Each structure stands twice: as structure tokens, then as C-alpha cells.
Image: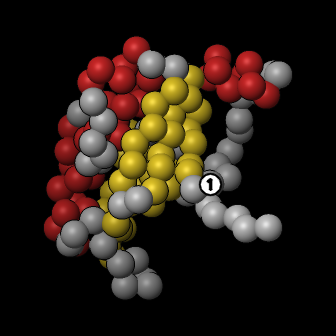
Amino acid sequence: MGIKFDMIGVVVKDMRKALEFYRILGLDIPESAYDEMHVEVVQNGFRFAFDLQEIVENIYGSWDEPVGHRIELAFLCDSREAVDELFKKITEHGYIGHREPWDAFWGQRYAIVQDPDGNLISLFA
């Protein structure tokens, strides 16, 4: 039996808000997807999906609002300066900067932002 890790899915409350955030991060997402209940984008051969909470509730049979952070989504930037610029761009669009850019002890430039559904998103170079 073979297995291949194929996709990450994010449950969202508001598709438009979620897609606008991830578009600022650099994902190629068509504006026509705003009214969809399920959206998939492919980046570097990997699928990233967004599902409205109502769809997931229907699939799972129920929905319990998550508490706490259990997964990290991390986006590699081209340079240390790119981390700073992307953090600034995201926060200027009104999204929450969880932790401003800093030089991490392991050598990377690092920052953390919050998507519209409260997921922490790491930016690094």
C-alpha cells in the first residue's frame, strides 16, 4: 500500500477574507473563488485547500470550534528583507501581526502573523 502526502486543508469562516489573506502571502487565487465553498490552489506541486466551516460540519457530522494552536503553516520568503516587507504588507492590510520580525537563534529571520481564522502563520528566510 502506497501513501503520498497530498494536501493541507484549512477550515475558514469567511472564504473571501481567508482568500484575500492568502493572496497577500503570494498564493495565486482567482477572485472568482470568493463565492465557492471549497477552493484548492496548487503551489510547487502541493495542494492547499480552503473549506467553509459549514461544509466541514456536514462532512464530519458536527463542528466544534478549535481552541489553541496545533499546526504551523510556514512560508519561505526569498530573503530576510522579504520577511520584513511581507509582515509589513500583511499588517498594513489590517491583519494581526502575532510577532514582529526577529533574528531567531537558529539563524533564520522569522515573523508570525495571524490569518482571519486565528491560525498562526510563520514567515521565514
In this view, 34 is above or below 100? above
**Residue type of the residue flagged with mark 1:** Ile
Quarter the C terminus occupies:
bottom left
User: Could you tell me which residue is drawn at 43 percent across and 83 percent down?
Assistant: 105
* Relative to 90, 48 lies left or right: right
Rendering coords of residue 15 (x, y %): 44, 23
- Across the whole image, how many numbered discs are drawn on residues? 1
Asked whether residue 85 is in view, the answer is yes
User: What is the quadrant of residue 56 in the picture?
Assistant: top right
User: What is the quadrant of residue 22 in the picture?
Assistant: top left
Q: Residue furthest front?
A: 1
Rendering coords of residue 43 (x, y %): 36, 54
User: Could you tell me which residue is drawn at 45 percent across and 19 percent down?
Assistant: 36
Asked whether residue 63 is in view, the answer is no
The residue wearing badge 1 is 71
* Relative to 48, 34 lies left or right: left
Closer to us: 83 or 57: 57
User: Could you tell me which residue is drawn at 71 percent across and 38 percent down?
Assistant: 67
Looking at the picture, the colour scheme in use is secondary structure
In this view, 72 is above or below 93? below
Is disc 1 surrounded by few (<14), some (14 to 19) or many (20+) residues within 10 Å?
A: few
Rendering coords of residue 107 (x, y %): 37, 85
Closer to us: 94 or 22: 22
Q: Secondary structure at mark 1?
A: loop
Q: Residue furthest right?
A: 61
User: Could you tell me which residue is drawn at 39 percent across and 49 percent down?
Assistant: 42
Rendering coords of residue 70 (x, y %): 67, 52
Quarter the N terminus occupies:
bottom right
In this view, 72 is above or below 109? above
User: What is the quadrant of residue 112 in the picture?
Assistant: bottom left
Closer to us: 24 or 29: 29
